Image: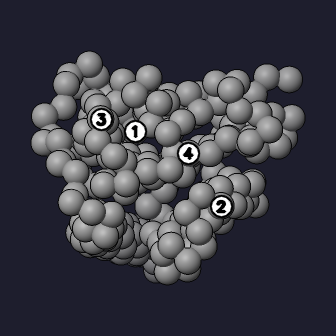
């Protein structure tokens, strides 16, 4: 039976192999005390709704009903989607599954109107760096520098209507030390988080308002359709 790609959500049981796999890998590479709450805290840092259309998506590769790979993206702004949570079953690597899920995520992001993807990987994941470079992602860091002096290694790529265009985001210089790199990444992530959460809150408020408008419209419609019946009864 061929592999299939399905849409899921962060808390769905089918997503659990991805979640637990990422936690095991991240904590194994960077230590459970590297950040508050370890990898689990980082994975659940953002609301589940950020990984659902129209802001984002979460896709899983299934083989014979089993989740073997997956990934997600969420919205930074109208143009940029951040790809996150890329994972493949360790026993099934080197089968092109990461490429499959990356392609599917890029297609989904383009279908939602995004024209740029952004992602970052850790300084202890050289295989991830090699993957993203092979997929045409532009490093926003100096690949010749010690990755410890960046800690988080960011990339960008244009997709959809701007596919093939070269990005022009400035390349970050390396920090003077690992400690300085840590502080810089912390400040960058805090700024990104504030922006992402504000966007999500605005989107949620707009959806709630649209829901109220729809409810109000339905109420008016019901009242209008009830009036002729009342008149005919008299």
Q: Which label's residue is closer to the chain start, 4 or 2?
A: 2
Q: Taking 150 as reference, is 129 above or below it?
A: above
Between 172 and 12, the one lying in front of the other is 172
Q: Position of residue 183 (x, y in %)?
A: 27, 71
Q: Which quadrant, please, contains the N terminus?
A: top right
Q: Using the numbered discs, state the Cα–Cα distance from disc 2 to disc 1 in whole angstroms.
A: 30 Å
At 59% from the left and 27% from the top, the residue drawn is 100
Q: Which residue is mark 2?
A: 28
At 26% from the left and 19% from the top, the residue drawn is 164
Q: Taking 228 as reference, is 103 above or below it?
A: above
Q: Circle 3 sits in a helix, a strand or a loop, which is it? A: loop
Q: Circle 1 sits in a helix, a strand or a loop, which is it? A: helix
Task: For marks 2 and 3, give the one nearer the viewer.
Answer: 3
Q: Which residue is mark 1?
A: 109
Q: Using the numbered discs, state the Cα–Cα distance from disc 4 to disc 3 in whole angstroms.
A: 24 Å
Q: Position of residue 50 (x, y in %)?
A: 44, 61
Marks 1 and 4: CB-CB under 8 Å? no
Going by the image, does 91 lie left or right of 187?
A: right
Query: Looking at the rendered structure, which numbered label has been put on residue 144?
Result: 3
Marks 4 and 3: CB-CB under 8 Å? no
Q: Circle 4 sits in a helix, a strand or a loop, which is it? A: strand
At 40% from the left and 28% from the top, the residue drawn is 133
Which residue lies most toward the top here? 164
Q: Residues within 10 Å of mark 3 (few under 14, many from 20)?
A: few
Q: Using the numbered discs, state the Cα–Cα distance from disc 3 to disc 1 in whole angstroms.
A: 30 Å
Q: Which residue is mark 4?
A: 86
Q: Position of residue 42 (x, y in %)?
A: 50, 69
């Amino acid at each position: 039976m061929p592999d299939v790609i399905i849409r899921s959500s962060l808390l769905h049981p089918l997503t659990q192999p991805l979640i637990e796999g990422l936690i095991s890998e991240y904590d194994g590479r960077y230590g459970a005390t590297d950040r508050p709450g370890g990898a689990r805290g980082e994975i659940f840092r953002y609301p589940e709704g950020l990984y659902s259309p129209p802001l984002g998506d979460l896709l899983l590769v299934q083989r014979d009903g089993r989740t073997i790979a997956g990934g997600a993206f969420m919205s930074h702004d109208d143009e940029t989607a951040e790809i996150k949570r890329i994972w493949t079953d360790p026993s099934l690597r080197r089968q092109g599954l990461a490429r499959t899920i990356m392609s599917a995520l890029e297609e989904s992001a383009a279908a939602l109107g995004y024209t740029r993807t952004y992602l970052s990987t850790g300084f202890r994941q050289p295989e991830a760096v090699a993957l993203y470079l092979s997929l045409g992602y532009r490093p926003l860091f100096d690949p010749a520098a010690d990755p410890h002096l960046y800690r988080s290694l960011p990339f960008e790529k244009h997709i959809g209507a701007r596919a093939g265009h070269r990005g022009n985001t400035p390349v970050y210089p390396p920090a003077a030390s690992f400690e300085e790199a840590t502080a810089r990444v912390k400040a960058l992530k805090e700024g990104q988080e504030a922006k992402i959460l504000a966007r999500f809150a605005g989107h949620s408020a707009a959806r709630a308002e649209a829901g109220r408008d729809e409810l109000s419209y339905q109420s008016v419609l019901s009242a209008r359709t009830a009036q002729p019946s009342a008149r005919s009864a008299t």
